[in-house]
Image (cartoon, rainbow, N blue to C red):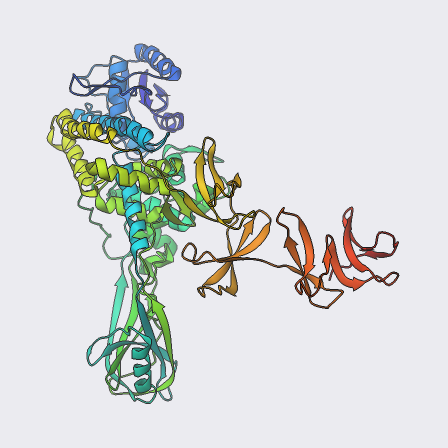
Amino acid sequence: MKLVIVESPAKAKTIAKYLGDGYKVDASRGHIWDLPEKTMGVDFKNHYEPELQARKPEQKETIERLKKEVNKAEKVYLATDPDREGEAISYHLQCALNLDPNEKNRIMFNEISKKAVNNAVANPRYINKGLVDAQQARRVLDRLVGYTLSPVLCKKIRNKLSAGRVQSAALRIIVDREKEIKAFKPEEYWTVSALLEKPKATPQFIANLTEKDGKKFKIKNKEQCEQALNVLNDGKYVVTSVKRSVTQTRPQPPFTTSTLQQDAVNKLKMSSSVTMSVAQQLYEGFDIAGMGHVALVTYIRTDSVRVSDDAIAAARERITQVYGKEYLPEKPNFYAAKKQAQDAHEAIRPINLDITPESIKDKVQRNQYALYKLIYRRFLASQAMSASYNSVTAGISCENYGFTATGKTLIFDGYLAIYNENKAAKNSDEEENAVLPSINEGDLLTLVKLKNEQKFTKPPARYTEASIIKTMEEKGIGRPSTYATIMQTLYKREYVVKDGKALAPSNLGIQVTDYLEQYFGEVVDIQFTAEMEDKLDAIEDNGEAWYNIVDNFYKPMAEEVKTAMHGEKVVVADEESDEICEKCGSPMVIRMGRYGKYLACSNYPNCSNIKSLKEKVPPKETDVNCEICGAKMLERQGRYGKYLACSNYPRCKNTKPVNEIVAKCPKCGKDVVKRVSKKGAVFYGCVGYPDCDFVSWDVPTGTLCPDCGAHLILKRNGAKTVIRCSNKDCGFDGGEKIES
């Protein structure tokens, strides 16, 4: 019997299906050794040697079980994941199970298919110590940073904080963007567009003002705009140039780990952590009704866009069958890897194109189907024809001003028939026409109308989970396989919060970043972090002693810790909230207590009101303008009902109650609205107060009792709403209320 050891039981089940009799496949269930949980676990006197151990009872049980299986096996294969971490797990298994280090027992495959698994078993290799050392250096370095700096943060800022080699650099990117947004000063500008038409030709089209006196021109204020409009309203519009071309857009390459996470966030609204969890399921395999245990995609931790010749051939055949020969390029599409890519594995792709997303839609979980469909279509589209467009750009003059009109029509959809990129428009100020009429140089045009609009430059947008992952990859900090974990840590530590799709640093996140920047500049320095990634990669490539790189980083940091511990303690500023204190009307702030965050009145100690911080209802847009700054008011839900708050908060903190009209006042005929007392009690009063003193604790109908003349009210009677007289001494019964 031959023994194959993998990491997960799901993976073991899939591989066992392909190897058949004569093989036993068992799982280590991840790492069997790890650094101790409560101590540093690094031997400083012995070149930072990690003190690895089986720290959980189940890890010890796994080692003992596998030892028994090894003793019964004629041959052992270590088939952990094909990356650095997988190589380290295989090395730990080799050591713990007393396997011969001089024997070829390491096997790898990029996909869990019968062909790939059997080919791997036929071609075992030695464990790559360079990969193991590179992983060990990362693990030790991250432990040193985390276990050295986190206690400093806990002592100088507050408990339960953490720092990390990549985590802190990623947080700084988000914090720097927030500071850039807050420091941004909007500048006024105006846009002018002309709706034009060519006599006896259709359609009408839009041209944007772009030049003055032959130079690029941007209107800076109202006066400049009015000067231009005075000329443009009476001027002649002449076509000065027409440029026609056929443009093409090429399909994107198949997914890498990073681009998969980005598209899953943008298209599926699936967080990076959920994406990687579901992707792991697709890679390891699971039971599918009528198909048995099946793995669907290749290895999901990769920075390569390369795919095998067999996969390309299968994709080209599938495109021809489903979409037709016109969608197949003459030669296969190939994509260049990024400069820093390791290119160790193929891109993420389906293993078997005959297993279409539609064929398993009703047999798998919704997330599994959605992500598999994304991977399947992106891969298939990567081998399809480019999309083609007819593009026309026309220059138009009016006196000394110049306009530009563009038109773009799709000729051939190509890869877009398979996978639509949905790219955002380049410039929202430039309106593009679907099509332009047949125009030529020298044509006279008729002005239909001019449109001008005042605008202000906008600050850079906050990062989203997709864009921060893209930025981390571009800047070379961390590795794609770690991005999901980094994001989870930033959320867990409350350094970053989600505002819709956008990521905003909390006050705590800003304070932690500022503190680290003050005392441990290199830890949050983006360039330094990227260069450290390169040095760690070099351990694998150049065989450099890993502990030298660790030593050069750690010793200066240890000296910085001494300086930091002598510094002052940091007081974290309160976070602003959009809640208003119902007792005194002051803004509420978010504070951190022993049991988490809570809302407290900013007017403390004059007002000591506090309340729990519950999940908020998203605000609703209204057509009401703020009387202070002119911005739109948002309808929000407070403790005692709805209220209006300025959308320009915190720059403008104007609020006012939402008065729900329930009836006409039986006394004066004005509106009766729902109100809330200072103690939170709901009542109904006339908007004419104090001239009209009508008030009711029950919902009034706006009509008077025919028997006694008191106002009628609505009362609940079981499941029904009935009409009653507000005068308790009157027995009038108006019956059940009829809904309109």
Residue furthest front as drawn: 606
- Identify the image quadrant of residue 523: top left
- At 32% from the left edge and 36% from the top edge, which residue is drawn? 570
Residue 340, given in percent of the width and then of the height, sits at 18, 43
Judge from the rendering whether residue 740 lies leftward or rightward of residue 127; answer left or right.
right
Q: Which of the two residues, 594 or 219, is positioned nearer the viewer here?
A: 594
Q: What is the quadrant of the C terminus in the image? A: bottom right
Locate the N terminus and report the quarter of the image it occupies: top left
The reply, left or right, for residue 242 in relation to residue 57 is left
Q: Position of residue 151 (x, y in %)?
A: 30, 27
Q: Position of residue 34 (x, y in %)?
A: 30, 21
Q: With respect to residue 644, does 40 lie above or below?
A: above
How many marks the image carries: the answer is: 0
Q: Left of 533 or right of it: where is 237? A: right
Let me know if residue 314 appears in the view: no
For the residue pair 581 and 119, the one nearer the viewer reads as 581
Using the image, determine if residue 426 lies above or below residue 216.
above
- Seen from the viewer's position, the closer of residues 254 and 478 is 478
Tell me if residue 662 can be seen: yes
Residue 662 vertical placement versus 334 (above, below): below
- The answer to whether residue 649 is above or below residue 21 is below
Give the left or right position of residue 386, taking residue 340 as reference. Answer: right
- Image coordinates of residue 481 in percent, x first then y, are 30, 37
Residue in the image at 43% along x and 36% along y? 592
Residue situated in front as seen by the camera: 188 or 261:
188
